[in-house]
Every structure is written in structure tokens, then in C-alpha cells.
Image (spheres, rainbow, N blue to C red):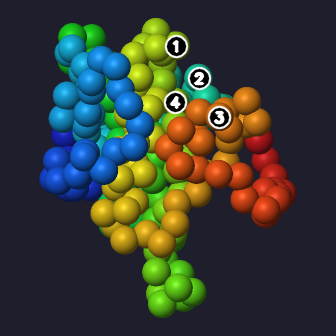
Amino acid sequence: MLLDETPLFEPSLLEELDWSNNTVPFSPPISPSQPGQGLVLRPLCTADFNRGYYKVLCQLTKAGDVTPEQFIRNFEHMKKTGDYFIVVVEDMDLGQIVATATLITEHKFIHSCAKRGRVEEVVVSDACRGKQLGKLLVSTLTLLSKKMDCYKITLECAPNNVAFYQKFGYSASNETYMQRRFFD
């Protein structure tokens, strides 16, 4: 199995986003096509395994010890379903992933067999915080979910992050998030 540049999803989906529908201001202005000096926003590829993708994820949560074979197997599964949209920001000067976020689409029977989007694993490397990359990732995935015809998009976040997500039009629901863990 090779680690290569094959994208998880068609990059044209990002290129075709109507950034004029973005509701959050950026100063200085950045966008998916121009995320900042020396940075590229694009779909995840398997070669990102060696570009520090897991180092970034580990700044969010316990990512575990994953082999390249496990990574490729999971990547191929995600690509095959067509329901996973993991975006990364790569620092081209360093050849390292500095930020990532995931959009997962769930197919429903409700709302006339609509889709629901879920944002997960939004994380920006400590070294790149303050460059608006978190805002860029959330704005991008929010617009992408709309493009994918999701009837709604949801996320879970820590209480101290609520104000951040409210900037994008997210609001707390009346539902309670519950979980049952089987392992850490």
C-alpha cells in the first residue's frame, strides 16, 4: 500500500464553493483558495500521514498509534462511502499539516430522505493559531454542507467554544448530547 496524493474527495467541491455566502468576516481576508501565505487548503490524502496529520489531531484528542496500513484502510473506506470530507491546511514551506476539520454527511429517511452534516475534529496546530484557520475550516465545511444539500449541520463543542461557533450561525439546541464510551 502506498501513501500518495489521491484526494479523499474531489477538490473541485472546494473550488466551487460560493464564498460570497460566507457570513463570517476575515481580517485580513482569506478564503479556501487563498488561506494565507504559503498555505493550501485541500482534501486529505494518504501522504498526509507523513506530513504530521496525526500530530495535529493529537492536539485535540487521543489519536492512538496508527500504522500507515490502518490509515490507508480507513481512508479507502471513507473515500468509498463518499460521505467523508476531511479538509487539511498544509504549510507548503514546511511540508506539514497545520490544521484539519471533518464534515460527515448522514443519509436520513426524515426530511424527504435528506442528509445531515456533522462537523468534527476541528483543530489548528498550536504554532498556527491566531491566523483565522479555525474560522476558515468551519466556514468552508458549513458552506460545503449546504452545497451537499444537507438539511442541517451540527457539531458538539466544549462550553468555552460556544461563542466561536455562534459566529457561524450555530446555536445550542434543546437536545442533550449523550454518550456511552466503550474505550478511550
Circle 1 residues within 10 Å: few <14, some 14–19, many ≥20? few
Three-letter amino acid code of the residue under disc 2: Gln
Which of pointers 1 and 2 lies earlier in the amino acid sequence? 2
Residue 179: % across, % down: 81, 56
Give the residue pinned by disc 3: 163
Give the residue pinned by disc 2: 59
Label 1 and label 2: CA atoms lie apart by 8 Å
Label 4 and label 2: CA atoms lie apart by 7 Å
**Figure check: 72 above or below 150:** above
Q: Circles 4 and 2: CB distance less than 8 Å?
A: yes
Residue 91: % across, % down: 28, 18
Label 4 sits on a secondary structure element that is: strand
Please give the name of the residue rendered at 58% of the width and 50% of the height, measured from the top-left corner: 170
Q: Would residue 72 be visible to someone looking at this image?
A: no
| Residue 123: image tag | 4
Label 3 sits on a secondary structure element that is: helix
Closer to the eye: label 3 or 1: 3
Q: Circles 3 and 2: CB distance less than 8 Å?
A: no
Please give the name of the residue rendered at 73% of the width and 36% of the height, measured from the top-left corner: 158
Q: Circles 1 and 2: CB distance less than 8 Å?
A: yes
Q: Nearer the viewer, residue 110 or 180?
A: 110
Q: Would residue 24 be visible to someone looking at this image?
A: yes
Label 3 and label 1: CA atoms lie apart by 20 Å
Please give the name of the residue rendered at 79% of the width and 62% of the height, measured from the top-left corner: 174
